[in-house]
Image (spheres, coloured by chain):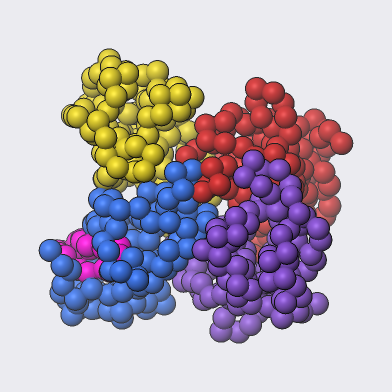
Chain colours: A blue, B yellow, C red, D purple
Amino acid sequence: MALHNPVEAELRVRFAETDAQRIAYHANYIVWFEVGRTAFLEATGLSRDRMRALRFRFVMAEVQCRYLSPAYFDDRLIVRTALQTLSRRSFTLRYEIVRAETGELLAEGGSAQVAVNKAGKAVEIMPAVRAALEQEA
Amino acid sequence: MALHNPVEAELRVRFAETDAQRIAYHANYIVWFEVGRTAFLEATGLSRDRMRALRFRFVMAEVQCRYLSPAYFDDRLIVRTALQTLSRRSFTLRYEIVRAETGELLAEGGSAQVAVNKAGKAVEIMPAVRAALEQEA
Amino acid sequence: MALHNPVEAELRVRFAETDAQRIAYHANYIVWFEVGRTAFLEATGLSRDRMRALRFRFVMAEVQCRYLSPAYFDDRLIVRTALQTLSRRSFTLRYEIVRAETGELLAEGGSAQVAVNKAGKAVEIMPAVRAALEQEA
Amino acid sequence: MALHNPVEAELRVRFAETDAQRIAYHANYIVWFEVGRTAFLEATGLSRDRMRALRFRFVMAEVQCRYLSPAYFDDRLIVRTALQTLSRRSFTLRYEIVRAETGELLAEGGSAQVAVNKAGKAVEIMPAVRAALEQEA
């Protein structure tokens, strides 16, 4: 199932991100999802500075990743990120990681984020953020 | 649902593992699952050296983590790891991460591993490995 | 030159910390120095909670590491940490990383830390911290 | 002292790379040096694939970094990398990390690399690699 209206971010696999199997270490895909999420949020207008001005904070509630084919040192990868669901206090994103040259799908996954206040308590997603996220839906 | 017969590994949250929300960064839980998995495999008799002697290799097929409560710098954590399923070419593990002092559950998750040969192709789990894993079931 | 009165911390090389040369990735030694530094500070009475109560903060001014022999997945390592110098606003530490079984020296290095206030400005090291560090000199 | 003929690589600070002081964690600068080094080597003609074809391998012998001013989440940084020395079996590089918008110098450092054979033993740098590195001197 292709992602709807994904935002793309490109990266290259760092040597730091490889492991002794000579492939990219699996936990780094979760970091790459973050790279995709940051690009996605910026594309919606929710840049770091805008989120700070709005005092919009979220925490991770869940992540999941399925690995289909390995990535190697210095590979060019594209992270595709799209909104999946948007509810009162949380939103979920879907990710695909593909090889830039071939488009081969290497991994896919998802994450759930919950809006929180400064104390870390779940709160409603504020209208400005909701509007930004909805335009990507 | 408590884990059946878990193996425990202890760790302390490194400053390197925190993020600008002043909590442990979420992708590090996937690394901590690896710490738990290594302890689990060693407890079954599948230490690094034994796995190497057997030429038993596996790759990650899937990881998933649900975050319940944050961990902070220097917190003492326990990773509990247990076998969930064992099939012909793969096995799945479940993990719980709890605060050592209180036992509070901070996160729980799972991973699926597939046995592979040197070329990375899925193969049957060899009898010696199967026997080791089954004793933990 | 052996370290004077070092504090020891033990760790095992995680698979996450290896790289495609099948050895521990070099930047992780800097993280292991942090593991040593945390143990050193705790041994002086400057635990996380004590430092927080004192509002003692420091930032890294310099790190350096010399690599002598590689470490491998699941190796047991000992990080030895000792105070080198203590001046008005800063202190330096020396580190050795040795293989636990053999005592073989794998790497050695140092770091310089500067005391800062909440705004990140260099300040004098407060007397309580100075007294704690001096007892290790 | 400005670097002679540096190669530039750009990156953005990932949330994964921040720490509980709300700044980029210091060990990540060593990883960013690797990003710079990879770009530098590629610029000399020593891409991953070319190095593999030549069977040219090196290991880190030393790294050093001096921190001048912190970097923050999502900051755009430039890593400048230049050859410093080239000897029979080793070469050293210098690095500068600057804020992309302002050119402010945030950190500077160096690394020493030793050419090794497959067994990890120090060997002479082969002529093709020497020629590539020299053109950057």
Q: Quadrant of the N terminus of chain B?
A: top left
Residue C61 visible, this angle: no
Relative height, residue C38 to residue A8 (above, below): above
Residue in the picture at 73% in, 64% down: D127
Mainly helix, strand or loop, the magenta region? strand
Q: Is residue D118 above or below residue B10?
A: below
Q: Residue at x 30, y 69 (%)?
A: A102
Looking at the picture, does residue B103 appear above or below residue D62? above
User: Outermost residue toward the bottom?
Assistant: D102
Left or right: residue D72 versus residue C88 is left
Residue C121, given in percent of the width and then of the height, sits at 68, 66
Measured as percent of width and height from the top left, residue B24 is found at 43, 48
Q: Horizontally, is C88 left or right of B133 in the view? A: right
Q: Is residue C122 left or right of residue B83?
A: right
Q: Quadrant of residue A43?
A: bottom left
Total marks in image: 0
Residue farthest to the right? Answer: C1
Q: Is residue D76 magenta?
A: no
Question: Which residue is found at the position 66% from the left and 29% from the top?
Answer: C99
Pick the front one: A1 or C122: A1
Q: Relative to residue A75, is residue B71 depicted above or below?
A: above
Q: From the viewer's side, name the closer residue of C58 and C5.
A: C5
Q: Is residue B69 visible?
A: yes
Q: Residue at x 51, y 63 (%)?
A: D49
Quarter residue C48 falls in: top right
The boundaries of the magenta stretch are: A80-98
